[in-house]
Image (cartoon, grey):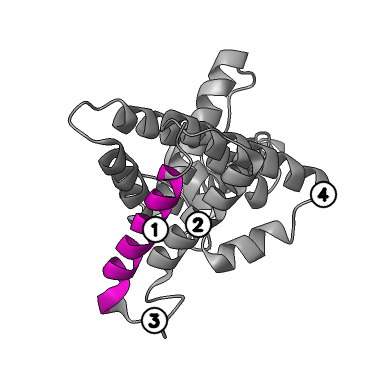
Amino acid sequence: YPFCKSKYIQKASLLLHIGHVKIKMIFKVYIYLREGPMPKISYSEEERAQIRSSLLATALELMSKQGVRHTTVEQVYKKVGISRTFFYTFFSTKEELVLEALYFQHPHILALAQKLASDPALSWREAVTEFLALCCRDGKHGILVLAIEDQQFIFCRLSKDSYQVFRQKQLRLFGSILECFGIKASPRAVNVFINLSLAAIIMRRAIPDTLPLFVPEAADDAVNFQINAIVSYLDSLRI
């Protein structure tokens, strides 16, 4: 009898152990499906920099194609292959991710302007026109421009310091673009160029979804008119 009792206890203990292992496995699968792969215990600074760049490039790609509102943090970190917890060691909020993605594309935009400005096959007017036209196209070149509703959503959540940083980086980018095309980047010229170019870009991308009362069939013609006006204005400022 003592032997039988011990045998039953052993079997019960084994079953409990198996059940515990299964529960742990199920929990791990749940965490994996919810948050993605668990991060390594430690990463080098170089590895973290590479992961951060991958997150920004992925966010930029998704937001350019489907918009900021329709791009989730989950989509970004799962596509990169990291967990939700690890993602938040890089960016504390979605708003921060959006801003950093905007900054991340600045070198690409500037390189595009430099390439067109130095193209011997293009006149000055053709180069500037092509640059603005490419920026107006709906994310086909991976250029992220915040829609009207995205601007309202993001910037009402920014601190004063974050807004100032954004404004400084914006002024630096648009000033560098003007200089690429041989235009002196005076404060007035930069400010007017920002407003004129963003107005054309945002309007083209907003028709017809955000601006349904505009005539979609005339969208391209209207934007081409705006671009020609911008180019004429910039031509008057050339050094």
Q: Is residue 27 left or right of residue 71?
A: right
How many angstroms separate mark 3 from mark 2 (CA)? 18 Å
Closer to the camera: disc 4 or disc 2? 2
Mark 3: give few (<14), some (14-19) or many (20+) Cα within 10 Å. Answer: some
Residue 53 horizontal/vertical position (percent) = 51, 29
Q: Which residue is mark 4?
A: 160
* Secondary structure of residue under mark 1: helix
Q: Are marks 1 and 2 in contact (CB under 8 Å)?
A: yes
How many angstroms separate mark 4 from mark 2 (CA)? 25 Å
User: Which labelled disc corresponds to residue 196?
Assistant: 2
Looking at this rendering, what residue extends furthest in the right direction? 160
Residue type, numbered disc 4: Lys
Closer to the camera: disc 1 or disc 4? 1
Q: Which residue is mark 3?
A: 214
Q: Is residue 152 left or right of residue 148?
A: right
Q: Which residue is mark 1?
A: 229
Q: Do we see residue 8 in this rendering? A: no
Residue at the (43%, 30%) spot, across then down: 182
User: Which labelled disc corresponds to residue 148?
Assistant: none
Look at the image and say whether residue 136 sits in the magenta stretch. no
Residue type, numbered disc 3: Phe
How many angstroms separate mark 1 from mark 3 (CA)? 20 Å
